[in-house]
Amino acid sequence: MEVHEDASSVILPAVFLVYQTISDFREKLKHPVMSVTYKEVSLYDAPGIAFYPGKARLLSCKHHYYDHIPPLINPGQPGHIECTTQRINYTDPFTNQTMKYALVVQGPRDVKKKELVFLQFHLNETDQDFSAIDYLLFSSFQEFVNSPEKEKFMKDCESSYSSWKFSGGFRTWVKMSLVKTKEEDGSETVEFKQETSVVNYIDQRTKPRSDQLFFVVFEWKDPFIQTVQDIITANPWNMIALLCGIFLALFKAADFAKLSVKWMIKIRKRHLKRSRQVMNHIS
């Protein structure tokens, strides 16, 4: 009886452990864990900034460093356009009927020097109570320049990326961060996260009632590119090693039980033999 109890005390927990190990492995396969890593860079690939100004006109555009933007000398008047820009017309990807006009500007690259791009727009006429300019960000201005089909490139960007607005009469400061997501098929998608702050512009010009100025700044938030991917924490080799250990324990338990039974039978035979000898002696 003791032999059977010793074997059961080993076998039953081992069987439960096998079942639990396989269940945990299957559960981890169904629910991968999100892994987030950060890569520090000194230079970004210059993003593309696509503006949809409508009737507004670009007055000036310039790259500055170390967060220093000198005061505007003649706000509302045409200034220097020192940014790399391209203008493009394409059909709306959602309607395929409306023509859209975009002004594409090369964004900042040097995150160490806190490079930023400062733009000023002017809108002379508007029939709305408030006015805003739409824009979207995409990952590489150079890819847009090198693209043989720029219209298709912009349609794909508008379908893939979110668009934002900045309002007239304010200075909007946009700090960007880049997030790369690795999909299960190995492909990689890129998206931008933004932190914006808005400061009121004290306009001291003598101007018509419908005159509007727009100011917007684009800068990288930090030098870290965030990479997100799903990883499966279940390791089949670990599970195999654990199962091998369990089966080895079961084998040893079975072997121990077999030897114990043989030993008990041997002791029993000796006991019976001695009992017969005593009985014969008494007879």
Image: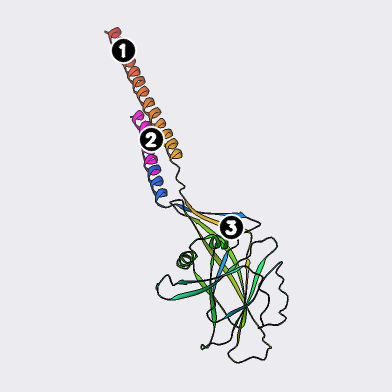
Contact check, label 3 and label 1, Cβ < 8 Å: no
Q: Main secondary structure of the magenta part?
A: helix
- Residue lying furthest front in this view? 148
Residue 28, given in percent of the width and then of the height, sits at 42, 49
Q: Is residue 263 left or right of residue 124?
A: left
Is residue 170 shown left or right of residue 21?
A: right
In terms of image quadrants, where is residue 202? bottom right
Q: At numbered mark 3, what does the secondary structure look like: helix, strand or loop?
A: strand
Figure check: 244 above or below 211: above
Tell me which amino acid carries mark 1: Lys
Mark 2 element type: helix
**C-alpha separation, residue under disc 2 versus residue under disc 3:** 54 Å
Image: 243 above or below 256: below
Q: Earlier in the sequence, mark 2 or mark 3?
A: 2
Quadrant (top left, top right, bottom left, bottom right) of the C terminus: top left
Question: In this picture, which residue range is highlighted in magenta?
Answer: 1-20
Q: Is 82 within the magenta?
A: no
Residue 9 got which mark? 2
> Which residue, as the protein is rendered here, is positioned at the far left?
283
| Marks 3 and 1, how far apart at CA | 84 Å
- Give the secondary structure at mark 1: helix
Q: Which residue is located at x 53 percent, y 87 percent?
A: 126
Which residue is disc 3 drawn over? 225
- Residue 91 placement, left or right of 57: left
Mark 1, residue position: 273
Q: Residues within 10 Å of mark 1 (few under 14, many from 20)?
A: few
Residue type at numbered disc 3: Ile
In the image, residue 133 lies at what x, y percent? 54, 78
